[in-house]
Image (cartoon, rainbow, N blue to C red):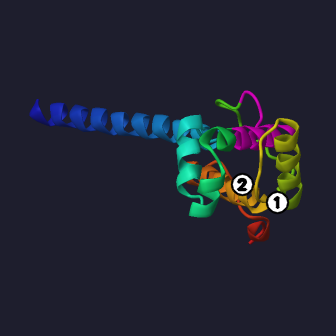
């Protein structure tokens, strides 16, 4: 009798292991196909960007002006299709490369700032804000590879 009990215990353990492996493998495959969840938190982004700006840029921009520049940057990304709606549990279906060019973004931000009465004392401040904002995106995992890294 104890031999049959031991066989049933071993079979039950093997069956449980196989079942768990199948379920975990299926979920891992499903989650791998989904876009990663990246959460952009406005106050965190503002603080991150402000901390990563050089002292001279920090002295020329108020936090309200910086917040507006970050908002304009997000609008620009949305217009370029880089900030799509409904991304929760969306399958990764990237079928074209989008390259972000710094010059057109800087020109856009300068134009938006001028239209909305945000005084920019030095154009380099906008470039620095964009660079620091890109660093924030990279820190939260919201950016893909650099154009030179594609295909390597």
Q: Residues within 10 Å of mark 1 (few under 14, many from 20)?
A: few
Residue 137 % position (x, y): 63, 50
Residue 71 sits inside the magenta stretch: yes
Locate the C terminus by quadrant.
bottom right
**SS for tag 2?**
helix
Residue 87 % position (x, y): 70, 32
Asked if residue 59 can be seen in this view, the reply is yes
The magenta segment: 68-86
**Is the residue under label 1 in contact with that under label 2 (CB below 8 Å)?**
yes
Residue beneath the point at 10% across and 33% down: 2
Determine which of the numbered discs, if any, sits on residue 102 in the image.
Answer: 1
Q: Of 22 and 6, which appears nearest the observer?
A: 22
Residue 139 sits inside the magenta stretch: no
State left or right for residue 78 relative to residue 140. Answer: right
Residue 46 position by quadrant:
top right
Q: Badge 2 is on which residue?
A: 130
- Pick whichever of labels 2 and 1 is earlier in the sequence: 1
State left or right for residue 60 relative to residue 140. Answer: right
Q: Is residue 31 above or below residue 50?
A: above
Residue beneath the point at 11% across and 29% down: 1
Q: Is residue 23 above or below residue 101?
A: above
Residue 146 % position (x, y): 74, 64
Residue found at the far top of this picture: 86
Asked if residue 41 can be seen in this view, the reply is no
Residue 6 % position (x, y): 17, 36
Provide the major secondary structure of the magenta segment.
helix
**SS for tag 1?**
helix
Q: Residues within 10 Å of mark 2 (few under 14, many from 20)?
A: many
Q: Of 95 and 117, which appears nearest the observer?
A: 117
Residue beneath the point at 80% across and 37% down: 75
State left or right for residue 42 relative to residue 74. Answer: left
């Amino acid at each position: 009798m104890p031999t049959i009990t031991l066989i049933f215990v071993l079979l039950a353990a093997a069956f449980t292991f196989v079942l768990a492996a199948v379920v975990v493998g299926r979920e891992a495959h499903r989650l791998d196909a989904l876009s990663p969840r990246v959460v952009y938190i406005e106050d965190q982004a503002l603080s991150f960007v402000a901390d990563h700006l050089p002292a001279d840029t920090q002295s020329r921009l108020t936090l309200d002006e910086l917040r507006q520049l970050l908002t304009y940057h997000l609008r620009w990304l949305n217009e370029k299709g880089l900030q799509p709606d409904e991304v929760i549990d969306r399958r990764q279906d990237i079928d074209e490369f989008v390259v972000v060019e710094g010059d057109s973004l800087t020109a856009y931000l300068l134009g938006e700032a001028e239209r909305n009465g945000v005084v920019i004392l030095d154009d380099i401040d906008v470039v620095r804000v964009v660079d620091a904002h890109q660093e924030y995106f990279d820190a939260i995992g919201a950016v893909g590879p650099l154009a030179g890294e594609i295909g390597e």
